[in-house]
């Protein structure tokens, strides 16, 4: 690690303040170019701890930048991982307040819920599928706190991978009942299809993102507990939204889920 504990705590306070106050900031590596990956995840961990101290539950985990389209859109080369806190969760069909966000975008995803713990190293797609209770459609609302959505990978890790809101719903299916590689999705905005894709867009198979997450946590002496909800990453490029928009995700064999922006 390159940053001291005081700097990590200050950056966590700054980034969470930007999240809660819906204000943007230049990427933190502008002032701290020496920060490394351990620093980035330490800042994210400090943000997580700040929320837990206030009594907020951690309700899930997420993988980000897992599709080639998303990597190209954001100008990065590898996935990142973060957490989902209680205020991030919205019920199916809910209203999402744009005033609480900076520059929201939506991503269509496949959500996994585990029935057994997963831990690396050596976790692979087969292990993920065997440990999965069910999968279902999910929409993640991302909202980077960095000005103009411009960041490097370490900055976005520190910012909890742009986590803001999410909704899951539709029809839960056992992972053994569907071929997640070929499962097709359509993302609609105001009734008009705006993005199309299939599960293979996420690292060849959405479960690969879960395996990478398990291996990432395993390297830190942690695991994915049983009963964990995990967003496996955007299947398509993120789509910008604004007040008045209604977004629906339709997933082959799993129904649909949606939310409205007000």
Image: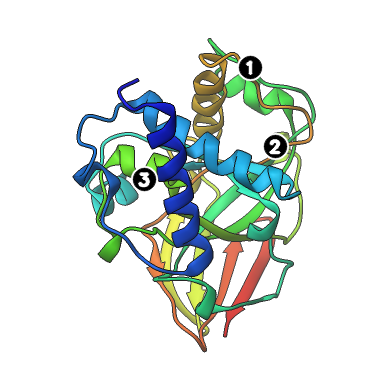
- The numbered mark at residue 184 is none
Q: Nearer the viewer, residue 222 or 179?
A: 222
Q: Position of residue 213 (x, y in %)?
A: 53, 28
- Does the rendering let one see residue 234? no
Name the side, left or right, on which 239 lies relative to 34: right
Foreground: disc 1 or disc 3? 3
In the image, taking residue 253 as reference, residue 209 lies left or right, namely: left
Q: Residues within 10 Å of mark 3 (few under 14, many from 20)?
A: many
The residues bearing labels 3 and 2 have C-alpha atoms spaced at a distance of 30 Å
Which residue bears the numbered disc 3? 156
Q: Secondary structure at mark 2?
A: helix
Say left or right for 210 vs 134.
left
Mark 3 secondary-structure assignment = helix
The image shows residue 168, relative to residue 201, as above or below, that is: below
Q: Position of residue 193 (x, y in %)?
A: 45, 75
Q: Residues within 10 Å of mark 2 (few under 14, many from 20)?
A: many
Distance (Cα) linking label 1 and label 3: 24 Å
Question: Which of the labelled discs sits on residue 119, or is there none?
Answer: 1
Look at discs 1 and 2 and give the one toward the viewer: 1
**Residue 239 in view (yes/no):** yes
Residue drawn 72% across and 25% down?
Answer: 131
Spatial separation of the CA atoms under disc 1 and disc 2 = 19 Å
Hey, which residue is sitting farthest top in the picture?
Answer: 122
Number of labels in the image equals 3
N-terminal-most mark, 1 or 2:
1
Q: Identify the residue position indicated by label 2 in the image.
A: 175
Figure quadrant of the N terminus: top left
Disc 1 vs disc 3: Cβ atoms closer than 8 Å?
no
Q: Residues within 10 Å of mark 1 (few under 14, many from 20)?
A: many
């Amino acid at each position: 690690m390159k940053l001291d504990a005081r700097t990590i705590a200050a950056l966590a306070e700054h980034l969470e303040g930007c999240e809660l106050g819906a204000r943007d900031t230049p990427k933190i590596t502008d002032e701290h170019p020496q920060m490394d990956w351990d620093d980035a995840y330490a800042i994210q961990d400090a943000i997580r701890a700040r929320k837990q101290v206030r009594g907020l539950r951690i309700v899930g985990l997420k993988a980000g930048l897992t599709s080639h389209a998303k990597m190209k859109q954001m100008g990065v080369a590898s996935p990142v991982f973060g957490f989902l806190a209680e205020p991030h969760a919205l019920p199916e069909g809910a209203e999402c307040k744009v005033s609480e966000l900076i520059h929201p975008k939506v991503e269509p995803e496949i959500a996994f819920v585990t029935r057994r713990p997963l831990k690396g190293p050596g976790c692979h797609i087969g292990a993920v599928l065997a440990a999965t209770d069910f999968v279902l459609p999910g929409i993640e609302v991302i909202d980077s706190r960095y000005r103009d959505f411009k960041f490097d990978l370490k900055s976005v890790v520190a910012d909890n991978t742009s986590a803001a809101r999410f909704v899951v719903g539709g029809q839960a299916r056992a992972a053994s009942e569907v071929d997640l590689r070929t499962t097709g999705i359509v993302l609609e905005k105001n009734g008009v299809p705006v993005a199309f894709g299939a599960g293979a867009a996420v690292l060849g198979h959405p479960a690969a993102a879960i395996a990478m997450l398990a291996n990432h946590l395993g390297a830190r002496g942690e695991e994915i507990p049983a009963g964990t909800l995990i967003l496996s990453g955007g299947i398509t490029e993120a789509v910008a939204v604004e007040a008045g928009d209604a977004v629906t995700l339709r997933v082959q064999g799993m129904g649909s889920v949606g939310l409205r922006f007000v």
